[in-house]
């Protein structure tokens, strides 16, 4: 207990007025308002003893950082007193520009985005600050920083939510899809760390509490879209491996839902091809109709059969082929998901 008290006293060593004047100069300089440094220093000196008594070292913030926030609040209030909300908004952004830039860079690196997206995310941060300033009422809460952090529920950046919305738009996912990707990534990384290898789909399904492997595959695709560079142009990615589609295909697969449905169909068609290879009792005419319907490569014999088959005969053989294939495909998948054969092309 004695050691705890001693460390608290050391960490809360009082600031001198000279140190405060230097800090006020730094804050005013960061906001490009050195014309207000004398007024800001005077206001800070008057409030210094009160601020130091309010400082709580247990909240893991240095006294200097705490006083810097207090000085920036006073500077913003000075500008608002001059009825210049645009200048106050820009000053609020400049005071937190470094934090916003760090958050933008971290998001770009984490999600393997194009490096140019850093500036776009920073601009989203600026707009977020302006939005917060527009709803800020100093008569209710004299601290803009306190108001902003409370609005953002303690996020590390004042405008993380605005930046995240821009991020989701770039990734072409909605908030629920992003949350799914985040949860999948956490479970995936945890299993990989635990087992020392890539987890199987079944292990991931159990970890996520998911019954069907088809659903797990969707979750994995969302993880790859959000964190592994999938659906991003190769030449624009921040960094990463080659598991992406070409830039010209991005317009086709920009809709994540459409992409996921296309992946589901491709997997299902692959299962149909495997089922045809295993099923020996299906007739040549039914096999030919199935291969034609799903774009599977036919044999020469099946090509000849299709050339002579009428439309009615094609529909009949396709329907009978479906009935014969269904139990085999279900046996192949055996993944716990409700399943229907996909519609023929």
Image (tube, helix red, strand yellow):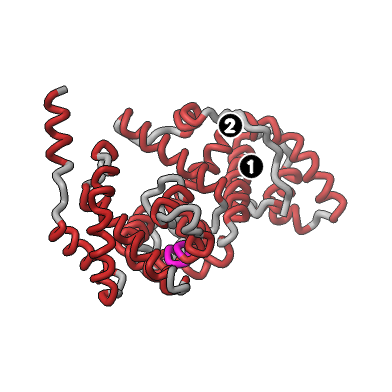
Q: How far apart are marks 2 and 1 (CA)?
A: 19 Å
Magenta span has 34? no
* Residue 298 visible (yes or no): yes
Q: Which of 336 and 160 is in front in this view?
A: 160
First to last magenta residue range: 125-129
Q: Which residue is drawn at 57% across and 55% down?
A: 256
Which is in the foreground here, disc 2 or disc 1? 2
Q: In this view, does 273 lie to the left or right of 14?
A: right
Q: In which quarter of the image is the C terminus?
A: bottom right
Q: Quadrant of the N terminus?
A: top left
Query: In terms of image quadrants, where is residue 241?
Result: bottom left
Q: Residue at x 16, y 29 (%)?
A: 5
Q: Which residue is drawn at 85% across and 55% down?
A: 310
Q: Nearer the viewer, residue 159 or 264?
A: 159
Q: Nearer the viewer, residue 294 or 95?
A: 95
Residue, far right: 312
Image coordinates for residue 318, horizontal then vertical, percent: 78, 45
Q: Residues within 10 Å of mark 2 (few under 14, many from 20)?
A: some
Q: Which of 172 and 248 is in front in this view?
A: 172
Find disc 1 in the rendering and name its residue: 272
Find disc 2 in the rendering and name its residue: 212
């Amino acid at each position: 207990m004695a050691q705890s008290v001693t460390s608290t006293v050391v960490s809360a060593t009082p600031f001198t007025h000279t140190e405060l004047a230097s800090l006020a100069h730094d804050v005013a300089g960061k906001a490009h308002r050195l014309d207000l440094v004398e007024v800001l220093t005077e206001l800070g000196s008057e409030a210094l003893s009160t601020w130091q008594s309010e400082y709580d070292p247990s909240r893991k913030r240095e006294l200097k950082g705490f006083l810097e926030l207090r000085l920036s609040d006073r500077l913003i209030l000075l500008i608002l007193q001059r009825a210049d909300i645009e200048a106050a908004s820009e000053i609020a952004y400049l005071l937190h520009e470094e934090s916003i830039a760090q958050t933008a860079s971290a998001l770009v690196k984490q999600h393997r985005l194009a490096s140019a997206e850093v500036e776009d995310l920073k601009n989203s941060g600026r707009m977020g600050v302006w939005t917060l300033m527009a709803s800020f009422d100093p008569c209710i809460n004299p601290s803009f920083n306190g108001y902003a952090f409370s609005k953002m529920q303690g996020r590390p950046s004042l405008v993380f939510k605005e930046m995240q919305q821009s991020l989701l738009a770039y990734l072409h996912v909605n908030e629920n899809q992003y949350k799914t990707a985040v949860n999948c990534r956490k479970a995936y990384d945890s299993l990989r760390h635990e087992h020392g290898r890539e987890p199987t789909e079944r292990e991931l399904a159990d970890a996520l509490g998911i019954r069907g492997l088809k659903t797990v595959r969707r979750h994995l695709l969302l993880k790859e879209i959000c964190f592994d560079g999938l659906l991003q142009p190769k030449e624009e990615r921040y960094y990463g491996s080659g598991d992406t589609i070409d830039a010209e295909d991005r317009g086709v697969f920009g809709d994540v839902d459409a992409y996921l449905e296309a992946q589901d169909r491709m997997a299902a068609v692959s299962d149909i091809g495997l089922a045809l290879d295993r099923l020996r009792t299906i007739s040549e005419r039914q096999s030919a109709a199935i291969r034609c319907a799903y774009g599977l490569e036919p044999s020469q014999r099946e090509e000849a059969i299709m050339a002579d088959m009428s439309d009615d005969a094609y529909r009949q053989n396709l329907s009978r082929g479906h009935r014969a294939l269904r139990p085999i495909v279900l046996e192949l998948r055996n993944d716990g998901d409700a399943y229907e054969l996909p519609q023929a092309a």
